Image (tube, rainbow, N blue to C red):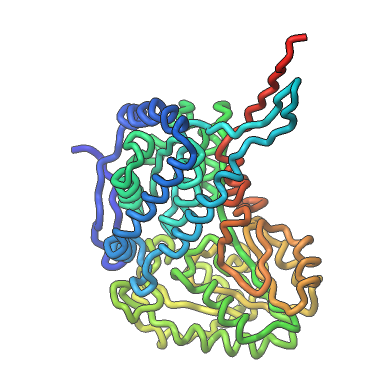
Amino acid sequence: MSATLKCISPIDGSIYAERPIMGVEAASALIAGARAAQKAWAARPLEERIVLVQAGIARLNQMGDEVVTELAWMMGRPVRYGGEFGGINERSGYMAGIAARALAPLVIEDSDQFRRYIAHEPHGVVFVIAPWNYPYMTAVNTVVPALIAGNAVAIKHSTQTLLVGERMVRAFVEAGVPADVFVNLFLDHAGTEALISAGAFDFINFTGSVGGGRAIERAAAGTFTGLGLELGGKDPGYVMDDADLDWAVDVLMDGAMYNAGQCCCGIERIYVAENLFGAFVEKAAAWVNNLKLGNPLDRETTLGPMANLRFAAEVRAQTAEAIRDGATALIDPKRFSEDDGGTYLMPQILVDVNHQMRVMRDESFGPVVGIMAVKDDEEALALMNDSEFGLTASLWTKDTARAEALGTRIETGTVFMNRADYLDPALCWTGCKATGRGGALSEIGYQNLTRPKSYHLRKRQA
């Protein structure tokens, strides 16, 4: 019997989906087919590629009811939130809209003597290794602009969201994208690393753990394959002394708890000006106490299970260690009796925390957040930068100049003011330090999914 990939549902621990693991030879054949089809795809007019990719997104939208239910079973997001179609449509629509400008040649000279310009050449076959926490939106970030730019795409999805790549490919092919141009691979880690080491791909985009990013870099060493890596995060929020308190509480706590805290740019630590600390903490606890933990198939549920028992165990461990070392837990476990010690994990707010505690230092990726009082911007800045990660930072103030000035000193990929946990497709999605390298979306996303090709054409021979 062949080995299989199994998606274990966080709802009840059952095997929700299972697929045979592709051997390297079978996967190589699919990749070879994609490489052969890519040239003809790139030769099509840009507008034609845009229309077909948008049709693929439209077809995926038509599958909405199935998609939303599958996501609940596979990774636990409550059905009340309707999947990820808002972000999918916003991002794909924006990237389609800027494609002509972003992919237009940079003309240096077009005179009687010379035509000199830089063109955007598709890499060839782009490999998308997508995560389980936002399985469609994170994949769309690369799949849509890669296809529009003229690349072929191979996607490998997380085992936790095993059916997503298969469904995306089906939607795009049914909409008219050639079958060989967009392919789904069911691979284990060993097969993935073997293909990368063999130089099977021309560009690789990975969203996932720091350990996963390191494994990909090791596998790609010496192949000179381009890499885009979005890895861990420990995103801070800083509530300044002039912030709109109610607005800050609402957005930051949503950023900390939405999707059971399993967000790449979720809020994992909060620093509050001393004059607002007491009120902020009181309002934050009341906000969290209104959540309803339960089965994600129930439309009343606002907080579903974590995607995997292992992830929940890590959050419980960080929380328990912090309390042992002096942190105070504000949320009463009796309020969330559905917490079963398994994937269903109650939310928690911790105060009396410090940066010696793992909950303020390591990525939690769950519904727990630590809150500290700070005396001024300098103390907040030092704490925000005291992290190995740098994805986003959320600043709360009425003073734009103050936020911009502080933002220039924060080691991060995106600075937010009076918002959090949002990906703006017009801006480059990027990070620094152990969060990784590269950038998705915006015009820069197209630059990363193509390579520059220079033309120096002399019209006169003498």
Q: Is residue 143 visible?
A: yes
Residue lying at the far top of the rendered structure: 462
Q: Residue furthest left?
A: 1
**Residue located 57% across and 77% down the image:** 251
Count the numbered circles shown.
0
Residue 208 located left or right of residue 118: left
Instruction: Identify which residue, 101 or 425, lies in the foreground.
Output: 101
**Residue at left offset 55%, top offset 42%:** 214
Query: Which residue is depicted at the point 67% across and 60% down?
Result: 387
The residue under the point 67% across, 84% down is 244
- Quadrant containing the N terminus is top left
Query: Image height check: is 426 above or below 258?
Result: above
- Percent across and percent down for residue 309 are 37, 63
Side of 423 where 169 appears, left or right: left
As rendered, which of 32 and 74 lies closer to the eye? 32
Is residue 194 visible to the viewer in this orientation of the structure? no
Q: Is residue 274 above or below residue 234?
A: below
Say which quarter of the image contains residue 394. bottom right
Return the x and y of residue 14 as percentages of the image width and height. 24, 61
Residue 131: x %, y % from top left:
44, 52
**Where is 28 relative to 186, above or below?**
above
- Quadrant for the C terminus, please: top right
Q: Is residue 407 above or below residue 220?
A: below
State the image coordinates of residue 338 (x, y, percent, origin top left): 34, 80
